[in-house]
Each structure stands twice: as structure tokens, then as C-alpha cells.
Image (cartoon, grey):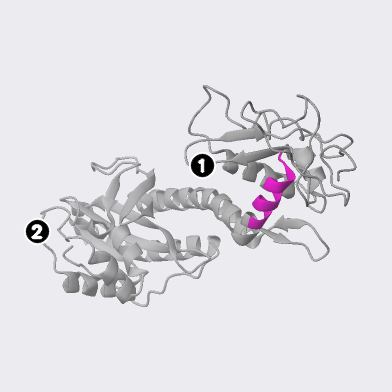
Amino acid sequence: MRSKAGQAPDGDRQEPAENPDGKPDGKPVGEPVGEPEGGRVAQQVAEPAGTLEVKRVRKPVGDSVDEAVGRSLDASVEPEAGANAQLVTPMIRGWRLLRYIAEGGTTSNLSEVGRAIDVNRVTIMRLLATLEHEGLIEKRPHGGHRLGMRFLTLAATALYSDDLLGHARRIIAGLSTDLGLAAYFVIADGDDVIYVLRELPEQGLISQIRVGSRVPAYQTAPGRALLASLSRDEARNRLARRDLVHGRTGAKLELEAFVQVLEEDRRRGCAWSHSGFEAGINACAGAVIGATGEAVGALSVVGPQHIFERTPGLSEQVQAAVIQSARQLSLMAGGSPPDGSSKKASRPDS
């Protein structure tokens, strides 16, 4: 026996079955229906792969659900017909919730959160659980959430990356001015290095390397400096994934012999290349170590081979400046300076 339309005597509400024409059985269109136990629902959303289907459930009379009830989850979030089909709606909702928390919003009252970001309570609960699982948010001791350490670390890394390039630009500018040679800063991208900064002396430098150049790491001095910052086993495993060939001649390189060259680079604290990648061009490079203990980039000083040959002591001067500058930039990056005990500039044939 029912005390009210759509409501059992014990207060639990039930949805009446729908007939084929889509109208609630025995109810005129527009009459409210009940809500499932445990919460108020404005919509039931099913999201099979590649589609988004929204089924509306009519708002119960007298219900105090937030203003999002009875309308779409978020008209500004849901991609409209003809809008960018590449948008991922759950990502947009998750970002809105993250931004809300970052701006000091409390998650103690999910209805208030829903009103603030126009997302229903059930979705907010699922988003909170997901973001917490991924470490992007964490629970406060007395309720609510705050940004998690993983999110803060990610943000700090991105901001620091910009700072690193600013510091690197100043340092390589000083190297170029003091030594009268070209200076570069590179970052790793997989097994390659990308040249992101360059400073040229007044006389310039004839080289095929430009800002944006991508080169296999093992073929260049700065790439070797990055590889030398790894352990012997890590470097060997990374190099074993590809066939090694000389950057200039194309001659095949033996893996173990190359690993030994990296050992020498590691002991020296820098990597030298004499006509290794480009004929007539010498380079000396040092790795920059970040706060995690891993290399975040490398700087190099580059010049014509004939200048090194006719200028006594230039190789030693360049090597000392590169090691010192790499250490300085590592400290700015929050890391420990790379070790390098030998002060003598050696001449590997690569």
C-alpha cells in the first residue's frame, strides 16, 4: 500500500516502470517521481566508449537538491553538438574540482561543491576518490580535501623548468662571453637530446646544430654527459636498445667500448668530443643534476678545432669552466653537483 504517489509507507521512494512511449506508467507527464535510496539524482549518466548518453530523472517535489538538479550536468562543460569532439568531459570536470580545491574551496559539503562547479554529487564523489587515489589531493585531518604532494610536486617541477632555462641562459651567455666560443644547453627527450638554448660569440660558429635540433644522445658531447650521469648498467641497457653508429662517419660502435668511454666521462666530470659529430668542431659538456638526483639537462661549450689547437691551455680552461658551470647550475636546480676529480682535458676519439 502506498501512502503517496511514488513513495512506499516506509519512506523509501521507488521509480515507477516506464512504458514503451517513455512516460512513467500511470503518471501524467511532468508529475515528479521518486529518487533512489541514498541520495538525490538529477540525471543518470551512462558513458559507453565513444558516446555520452544523458537520461533525465524528474526532480521530486520539495527536494532541496542543489541548483544543478533537473538540468544538464554542466551546459558549459558538456561538449555541444558541433563543438570540439576531442574534448574529454570527465577531464574537464576533474580540472574544475582541482581548481576549486586549489582556490580554497571545501569539499565537506558536496552540495555546495556541486553548486560551485556545476557537477552532480555522485560525480563529485567519484572524482574525489579518483583524485585521492592518484595522489593529486589528500584528505584534511578535520574534513575536506587539499592538494596532494604529487600535484604540488608536478606543479613545482613545471615552474622550476622555466626557472632552469632562465638560469641556464645566463650561464651559457657568460661561458660564451668569457671563452669566446659558442655555448649550448640541451635537455633529454627519450634517447635523444634537444638543443633548447644557444649563445654564439661575435665571430659566430659554422655548425648544423640549431636551437630545436634533435640528435641521438650518444652521438654528442652533451648527450654523453647525460648518459654518463646514469649508472653503468642503466647506461648499457639504454644503449643496447639501438644500433650505435659514429655521428659523423657512420661507423659502427661497439657497446662495451662505448660504455667504457662513458666511464671515463664520469670520472672526468665532463664529456669531450673532437670532430665527433661535426668535422672540425670540438665540444666539452657537463650534466646538470636536479633535485631528484637525475640529470635535467647538460650544457656544452663548442668551437672550431683549429682554435683549440693553436691556443695553448684553451682545452683546460674550457673544461674547468664547463665543470664549474654545470656544478653551479646543478645547485640552482636544487641538486648535488656532478663529481669530477680529474682536471686534465683528455681527448677521446669520439
Cα–Cα span, label 1 and label 2:
53 Å
Instruction: Characterize the local packing of mark 2: few (<14), some (14-19) or many (20 or more) Cα atoms within 10 angstroms.
Output: few
Quadrant in which the N terminus appears? top right
Hey, what amino acid is under mark 2?
Ala
Q: Which residue is mark 1?
A: 48
Q: Which residue is mark 2?
A: 251
Q: Nearer the viewer, residue 224 or 316?
A: 224
134 up-or-down from 303: above or below = below
Q: Which residues are magenta?
A: 119-129
Hey, what amino acid is under mark 1?
Pro
Is residue 180 visible in the rendered image? The answer is no
**Magenta residue check for 145:** no
Of callouts 1 and 2, the N-terminal one: 1
Q: Say whether marks 1 and 2 touch (CB < 8 Å).
A: no
Instruction: Characterize the local packing of mark 1: few (<14), some (14-19) or many (20 or more) Cα atoms within 10 angstroms.
Output: few
Residue drawn at 66 percent across, 59 percent down: 148
Measuring from the top left, give residue 90's x and y in whole percent.
59, 42
Residue drawn at 55 percent across, 55 percent down: 157
Quadrant in which the C terminus appears? bottom left
Q: Nearer the viewer, residue 318 or 197?
A: 197
